[in-house]
Amino acid sequence: MVDKGHGRIETRRIRVRTRLPLRLDKKWPEIKAICRIERIRETKDRCSREVIYAITSAPPETFDAAALLKASRDHWAIENCEFHVRDVTFREDASRIRTGDAPEVMALLRSSVLGLIRRTGRKPTEARPAYAARPKAAIKLLMGS
């Protein structure tokens, strides 16, 4: 699959293996296939290549290689739209909150705040410091007024 956009050409290839090594089959009996995905990104002055491996529990009769490649791409779209934005806006990866339910609760709070910010039409990285400097505006946003 080849995509052009954002000043680059991205080529993705996938190889799917449904005959699994015994060690994987015993450790994870629900695995149905292993995928090797190669991504090549070309810009005017640079070329990079990345190989990743993925596993799936989808039965082979319900997917083909193209569908798995699309599923992988869709997964990264979620990563880029949600998790990356939370990290850039709130430095989530640097958070020291790591025990109990607190990490999940904080992720939900951050996602909720991002949703509120997006409804205003502002960019999260600009809105966070603006609301930090104007707490009354932040409270109004939370209260829906």
Image (cartoon, rainbow, N blue to C red):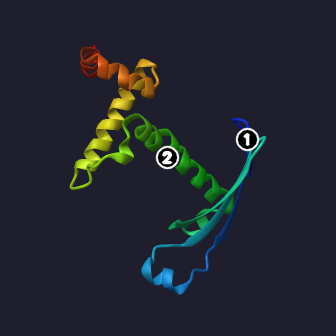
Foreground pick, 38 / 128: 128
Residue 115 lies, with reference to residue 81, above or below; the image says above
Name, please, the residue furthest toward the bottom: 22
Q: How many numbered tags mark residues here?
A: 2
Q: With 90 as the anchor, is 30 left or right in this view?
A: right
Residue 48 rendering spot, x and y as whole percentages: 70, 53
- Quadrant position of residue 36: bottom right
- Quadrant position of residue 38: bottom right
Q: Are marks 1 and 2 in contact (CB under 8 Å)?
A: no
Residue neighbourhood size for the residue with mark 2, other residues' Cα within 10 Å, grouped as few (<14), some (14–19), many (≥20):
few
Q: Identify the residue at image location x=24%, y=15%.
A: 136
| Amino acid type at mark 2 | Glu
Residue 85 rendering spot, x and y as whole percentages: 45, 37
Residue 132 lies, with reference to residue 106, above or below; the image says above
Residue 99 rendering spot, x and y as whole percentages: 23, 55
Return the residue at label 1: 8
- SS label for mark 1: strand
Foreground pick, 26 / 46: 46
Q: Identify the residue at image location x=63%, y=52%.
A: 70
Q: With 104 as the anchor, is 21 left or right in this view?
A: right
Name, please, the residue furthest toward the left: 100
Return the residue at label 2: 79
- Quadrant position of residue 98: bottom left
- SS label for mark 2: helix
Q: Identify the residue at image location x=50%, y=44%.
A: 78
